[in-house]
Every structure is written in structure tokens, then in C-alpha cells.
Image (tube, rainbow, N blue to C red):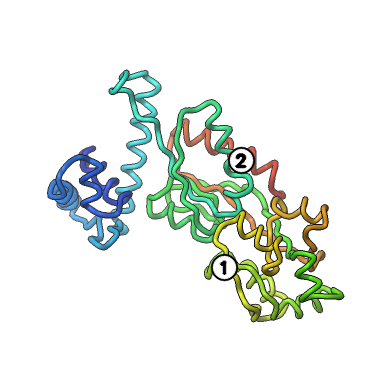
Amino acid sequence: MVRLQRDHLETLLAAVDHGTLDAAARALAITPSAVSQRIKAMEQQLGRVLLQRSTPVAPTADGEVVLRHARQARLLDDETARALGVGTGADAPDVPAIPLAVNADTLGTWFLDALALVRADTEVVFDLHREDQDRTAELLRAGTVMAAVTAEADPVQGCSSVALGVDRYRAVASPAFVARYLPDLGSEHHTAERMDRVPLVDYDRADDLQQGYLRRVLGHAPRGPRHFVPTSADFARAVTLGFGWGMLPEAQCLDALDRGELVELTPGRRADVALWWQRWNLASPLLERVTEAVRTVAAQRLHPLPG
């Protein structure tokens, strides 16, 4: 049986989390040479290359497996020490940290409410990684995070997957934008055709929500000028201020629609994004508590999955 040394595992974690061997050395209060020697010793023990010496460093496929083990070992050690009340003062166990991946709109609408439930009765800190829901599962595979809100239903190896619900998006714009670019809204298809060449707001260049919405109607992506606003709240504000039309989750647009601050462009056609919660298969009370809170708040804020 292979038994990896704890200081070797912590060194691998530090190298990946801090990006360079020098930064890992500073975090661990050892020399860069010692960092390199520990990682090389673990690679020799396993007969596998674990780390790509790039800038920043990155785990190999084998390194991702060891990285996941290292994070699990750290979490279980922290939870055990706290459950036993081991250590006081400077020797008290560290507050456990949970790395999680979540898409921007979920983070900007309901996810922090779920984490607040956990913080109300549990001592924990969160390391949130914001990524598109189509890519959060990659952070699970890489061992970077312990759980993720994702668009992938099939569980990543070593993880479980449960449905959270559907986040429903509506195509909206400000009344001033409609008056300027889309006066006399007609049928949904006619409106979609006119939306093809008017300004729109995208989150970033990888955002396919607006593009995919019109592509399904018109057979091609919209050809209008694009604003890029890469935060969820500012994206919604840019749409409300009339920069362009955009797809907003109902949590960010229903009240504004009721107040007349936004206009829904195609009321009969909306975009549903199904979300799942994937987490490591690890007997961790803390991870169970986070999962319980996320599922509870998601059930309140999202539409149920069809079927």
C-alpha cells in the first residue's frame, strides 16, 4: 500500500493553490528547493509525474488524483481535530476551508444565501471559484474544488450528482432601448429577427446564452454589436441602463418587469438552464451540511426540473 507523507501532500496543494514553487515555499516557510524535493520525492514514490512545471504550475491527470486526495485528507483531519476539541490557542485546529465552484448568476442571486445558512451554525470558510456552469465540473475533475453547481447531470468520477432545478432566463431590454431599436414589437419570430442586428450584452466571449437563444430561433448567432460586462450584477445593470438586450434570470428581472423598468421581448420563449450539484463522495459532515443548505435554497429559488 502506498502511504503518502502529509507534508508532501500539503506541498503539492500549496504549489497548485499559489501557482509557483516559490510562492508555495513562502506559504510553507521553507525553501523553494525543499518544495521541489518534496514533490520530486512523491513523484518518485508513485512513479508518476504529478505537476507540470509551467507558469502557473498545473497538476497532470495523475496529479489531479493526488490533489483530490490531499484536499480530502486535509478536510477530514480538520474536522476530526475540531470534533475532538484537540488543541487550544495557537495549537487550535484551523477553520476548515471548502473550495466550491459556481456560475456567476447563481452566485449573484441565491448561492450566498445557502452558504449563510451553513455559516449560521458552522465554523467554516469558503473558497469560491466563479466559472460558467458548463465548465465548473472541470474544476471537480482537476481536484480544485470539492463541490460545484454545474450543468452536467452525469457525475464526475468520485462524485455524486443531484438535481437542483431550472434557472429560467427571459430576454429583456429597457423601455428606452426598445423605443430606440425595437419599436412596435410584433410577433416573437419577427421580434427575434429584429434583435439579430441590435446591440446586446454578453457576460464574456465564452457566454453563449444570448447567442444560443437567437441561434435556436434564427439558425445563426446574432450579428449585432456586443457589450461585454463580466459580473452578474453589472450585466443586469447594463441591460437595465439600455446598453443592449440580454438574458436575465428571473431573480434579476421579475421585479423590474413589474415596475416597468424592463420589457420582455419574447414573452412566449424563454431559456431554461438546468443545474445540478456535484460533490465528492466523502463522508464529511461539513460537506453534507453545505449540500443540505444548497439543496434547500435551490428548491425555494429554482423551477423544478421537468418530468
Q: Which residue is mark 1?
A: 228
Residue 124 lies, with reference to residue 181, above or below; the image says above
Q: Nearer the viewer, residue 188 or 152?
A: 188
Q: Which residue is mark 2?
A: 295
Percent x, y for residue 9?
25, 43
Instruction: Tell me which residue sits at (25%, 49%) in the image.
Output: 23
Q: Residue 266 lies in what quarter of the image? A: bottom right
Percent x, y for residue 116?
57, 35
Instruction: Tell me which residue sits at (70%, 68%) in the image.
Output: 245
Judge the density around disc 1: few (<14), some (14-19), many (≥20) Cα neighbours within 10 Å: some
Q: Residue 250 lies in what quarter of the image? A: bottom right
Please tell me the numbered disc located at residue 169: none
Horizontal arrangement in the rendering, residue 29 relative to residue 93 (left or right): left
Helix, strand or loop at mark 1 = strand
Q: CA distance from mark 1 to mark 2?
A: 31 Å
Three-letter code, disc 2:
Arg
Q: Residue 294 lies in what quarter of the image? A: top right
Instruction: Tell me which residue sits at (23%, 37%) in the image.
Output: 6
Three-letter code, disc 1:
Phe
Residue 33 lies, with reference to residue 56, above or below; the image says above
Helix, strand or loop at mark 2 = helix
Percent x, y for residue 93?
34, 26
